[in-house]
Amino acid sequence: MVRLPADYEPPPEPPPAPPGRLHGIFIGGMAVSALVGVVALFAFITVGWPESIRRYIIALFFFAGIAFLACASAAVFTAARDTYPTRSGNHLD
């Protein structure tokens, strides 16, 4: 153990970095895919579509769900990545 002087104050913590651009893109992707999925499901339920078009609407709904899950997981990973400090030129090696 090393005794520190009585007047020692630890250096201030660096300010938190704002979320990255990639995180914002994935959040936007979540919003777009959620809206597409809701509109597709609403159109499927309310309108009597011919059988050939119904398949496309159901496929659009499922692809929107898959896109939402992919964007959500990518947004979580990019948010976790943003919590780590970035390398600067004045770090100790």
Image (cartoon, helix red, strand yellow):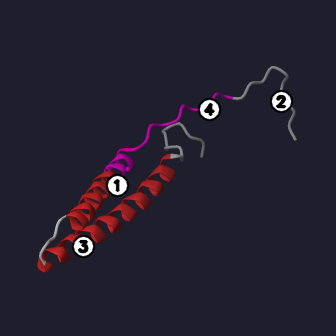
Classify 32 as above or below 6: below
- Tell me the SS state at disc 1: helix
Classify mark 4: residues with Cα within 10 Å, few (<14), some (14-19) or many (20+): few
In front: mark 3 or mark 2? 3
**Nearest to viewer (mark 2 / mark 4):** 4
Mark 2 or mark 4, earlier in chain: 2
Viewer-side label of 4, 3: 3
Q: Which residue is nearer to you in this view: 79 or 39?
A: 39
Secondary structure category for the residue under label 3: helix
| Residue at figure coordinates x 16%, y 70% from the top left | 48
Residue designated by label 2: 4
Nearest the viewer among 3 and 27 is: 27
Residue placed under numbered mark 1 in the picture: 30
Residues at marks 1 and 3, CA–CA distance in whole angstroms? 19 Å
Residue type at mark 1: give it.
Met
- Spatial separation of the CA atoms under disc 2 and disc 4: 19 Å
Q: Nearer the viewer, mark 1 or mark 2?
A: 1
Residue 27 in picture, x, y percent from top left: 36, 50
How far apart are labels 1 and 2 at the CA level? 50 Å
Which residue in the protein does label 3 denote?
58
Count of marks overlaid on the render: 4
Looking at the rendering, the stretch of residues picked out in magenta corresponds to 11-28
Give the structural element (helix, strand or loop) at label 2. Answer: loop
- Mark nearer the N terminus (4 vs 3): 4
Pick whichever of labels 1 and 3 is earlier in the sequence: 1
Mark found first going from the N terminus, 1 or 2: 2
On the image, the x and y values in percent for residue 40 come to: 23, 63
In the drawing, does residue 13 fall left or right of residue 45? right
**Which mark lies nearer to you, 1 or 3?**
3
Residue drawn 87% across the image and 41% down it: 1
